[in-house]
Image (cartoon, rainbow, N blue to C red):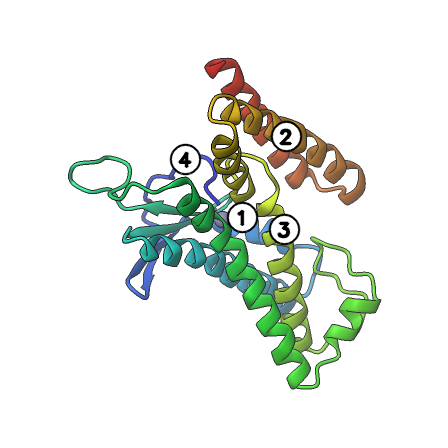
Amino acid sequence: MPLFQVPQPTRFDLNFSIAGIRVRVHPLFWVIAILLGTGSTNLLYIAIAIFVIFVSILVHELGHALAFRRYGQDSYIILHMMGGLTVPESSAFDSYQAVRLTPNQNIFISAAGPIAGFVLAIAIILLGVGLGGVFIVNLLFGFIPFPSVILPYEFGVLDRVFALFTLINFFWGFINLLPVFPLDGGNIARYTLIQTDPINGLQKSLWLSVIVGALIAILSFVFLKSIYMAFLFGYLAFQSYQALQYRF
Ligand SMILES: [Zn+2]
């Protein structure tokens, strides 16, 4: 999910690599984990929530990175305050990306992040059911307030991990598929609309982004009581509106 700008490296960054893909975790990434993970006073539960959010966002970005690799484009991952970002490595000749991608390749790369998360969630459900976990019953028949990690049932630690993995991956994938720029769904809408309408497609995708972004901001504030989601989508709607003023 490409959001905001690439943050500058700091000495508190966590650096590692997976399958040859460089990963950098900005210290403010842990803010999002704490924002989504608070609601419990149990330190173990908070630690579990932070671990699950970290792994889930990383898997989402790895989906994008592996899709880039499929088209011969190297990329690296940054986890930062608003989530994650997979950035194409630039070549010596091009400051942005080395490989020119078609609209359909861009759509596939954008979809690959949410798909990776959904695959992880389904794998976790199957593993949980295979191990005889009760969490799936509670997920299906109980009401679990999100983003709070307070779960209304007496979960075992493993059931809690499974339930959070399932919820967070579906939640994160769904949020990212909303047609709001620059979320994955916003990119998918843009590359779809510029193919069906080369003249006005970009403008239409930005208006879609303004309307859906504003609607989600209001709904999150009223129903989810989430200041974070309201601020995020309000900001994204405003950014798209500014892009419309600037370009058209
Ligand atoms: Zn994404």
Q: Secondary structure at mark 1?
A: helix
Q: Which mark is residue 5?
A: 4
Residue at point 61% right, 42% down?
A: 178
As rendered, which of 233 and 98 lies closer to the eye? 98
On whether ligand 1 comes within 8 Å of the CB at mark 3, the answer is no
Q: Earlier in the sequence, mark 4 or mark 3?
A: 4
Judged by depth in the image, the label closer to the viewer, 2 or 3, is: 3
Q: Residues within 10 Å of mark 4 (few under 14, many from 20)?
A: few
SS at circle 2? helix
Which image quadrant for residue 135?
bottom right
Answer with mark 2 or mark 1, whichever residue precedes in sequence. Answer: 1
Of discs 4 and 1, which sits in the foreground? 4
Q: Position of residue 199 (x, y in %)?
A: 48, 21
Residues under labels 1 and 3: Cα distance?
21 Å
Q: Circle 2 is placed at which residue position? A: 234
Circles 4 and 3: CB distance less than 8 Å? no
Residue placed under numbered mark 1 in the picture: 31
Front disc: 1 or 3: 3
Identify the residue under disc 3.
Answer: 174
Q: Residues within 10 Å of mark 3 (few under 14, many from 20)?
A: some
Dot 1 beta carbon under 8 Å from ligand 1: no
Amino acid type, callout 4: Gln
Task: Tell me which residue sits at (64%, 65%) in the image.
Answer: 166
Residue 27 makes an appearance in the image: no
Q: Nearer the viewer, mark 4 or mark 3?
A: 3
